[in-house]
Image (tube, rainbow, N blue to C red):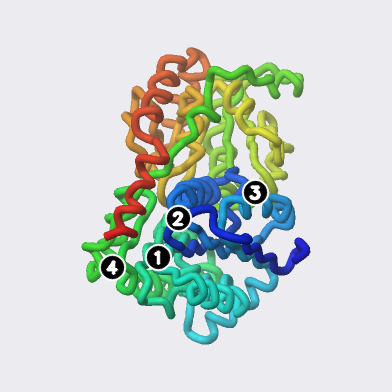
Amino acid sequence: MLLTDAVLDKQPAAPAQARADLLLLVHRIPYPPNKGDKIRSYNLLKHLAQRYRVHLATFIDDPDDWQHVPAVEAMCASSHFVRLGPLQGRLRGMGSLAAGGSISQGFYRDAGMQAWVDRTVREHGVGRIVVFCSPMAQYADSHAAARRVIDFCDVDSDKWRQYADKKSWPMSWLYRHEAGRLLAYERQVAARFDASLFVSAPEAELFRQLAPESADRIGFFNNGVDTEYFSPDRAYPNPYEAEGKGGPAMVFTGAMDYWPNIDAVQWFADHVLPLVLAGEPRARLVIVGARPAPAVQALAARPGITVTGSVPDVRPYVAHAAVAVAPLRIARGIQNKVLEAMAMARPVVASPQAFEGIDATPGSELVVADAPEDHASRLLALLRTPGDAMGRAARACVERRYSWPAHLSSIEERLEC
């Protein structure tokens, strides 16, 4: 079949070796590993592909990602890719809402994908199913004979609740409504599946409180970091010198069309940056990430703020920054941006929400700050006195505690019970 932006299947001529067949359902193509959910799903796929014959079904919501299909195909025994346009997804989501379901379920509902899943389970005798993200669980509903494990990652229903708290009517009503319906679905999934996993201990504990009937089957595995890739020992070109601006940089990294990231940099620009500039006029906030929303682009007009948009490699921006900032006010699970900056031996100033779930010692391995004045005072101290000692401690922390293979072993334990 030709590669198109509609659907692409791949079937190998023959299995490389006699390994058990496993179905992996992911809401977004798990490559390239350049953002939070893709980093986790890519490492999950890589880990499973070393142990099983993986049959992957996934959506592609970014046209640029079609070029990465061959790299994913090479890891799988068979694969199925479905184009997902935003308008198409929203229409299906609203249809699901009207029918009494959640927007998230409808957004990711596709009859062709369901048919491929059913055929693959039947033809390959699939006895193990791993689901990544709750809306993909619908494709495993009719396969209760298989051992089913879901990586919820985050408690998405609680994220919608947080969105509702930050928005005005009518969006606050819509988000709160979605939070309730999605939580009901998450509880149904957890009750039917053999195991439900989350990205951190606090996230798992939150869901135990929300779904007590499934408490004994709820666990977690932390995110990891590729410490060879995110290494402070490599030579990186200094992107700030190319800009001709010599002041110390505070860097924020992330997908800049994601609302929690947008909210974070807006809050920082409004409430923290003016206090920092009053004490260190040459300092600047550098926002690094693809697809900056109009609200983020508008920040570039303010003194002391640079918005890069997409960059080929985020590491130089982190390596040559004086400090990495993570002032998120809405956050679920573990923030990869924090772990990656720590792996690069950079001091990090994080909000309590961004710090949640990270096994590190505040004050020595990173800084946790809440109020604007607290952020500003901690940042000014790091801008005036380089935080090299904290950076080294942060790197050591990541090397000790955030290995992907060690964390992912918990998936196999639950698949092979």
Could you tell me if the residues under marks 4 and 1 are in contact, i.e. CB atoms within 8 Å?
no
Q: Position of residue 52 (x, y in %)?
A: 45, 55
Within 10 angstroms of label 4, few (less than 14), some, or many (20 or more) residues?
some
Query: Does label 4 or label 2 sit earlier along the sequence?
Result: 2
Q: Which residue is mark 1?
A: 128
Comparing 190 with 142, the one in front is 142
Q: Secondary structure at mark 1?
A: strand
Q: CA distance from mark 1 to mark 2?
A: 10 Å
Q: Position of residue 211 (x, y in %)?
A: 28, 68
Q: Secondary structure at mark 3?
A: helix
Q: CA distance from mark 3 to mark 1?
A: 23 Å
Comparing 158 with 34, the one in front is 34
Comparing 101 with 272, the one in front is 101
Q: Which mark is residue 211?
A: 4
Q: Is residue 74 above or below residue 211?
A: above
Could you tell me if the residues under marks 1 and 2 are in contact, i.e. CB atoms within 8 Å?
yes
Q: Amino acid at mark 2?
A: Tyr
Q: Is residue 89 above or below residue 14?
A: below
Q: Amino acid at mark 3?
A: Ala
Please state which of the two labelled residues, at mark 4 or mark 1, is closer to the viewer.
1
Name which residue lies at 45% across and 52% down. 48
**Residue furthest bottom as drawn:** 99
Q: Which mark is residue 71?
A: 3
Q: Which mark is residue 52?
A: 2
| Quadrant in the picture for the C terminus | bottom left
Q: Which mark is residue 281?
A: none
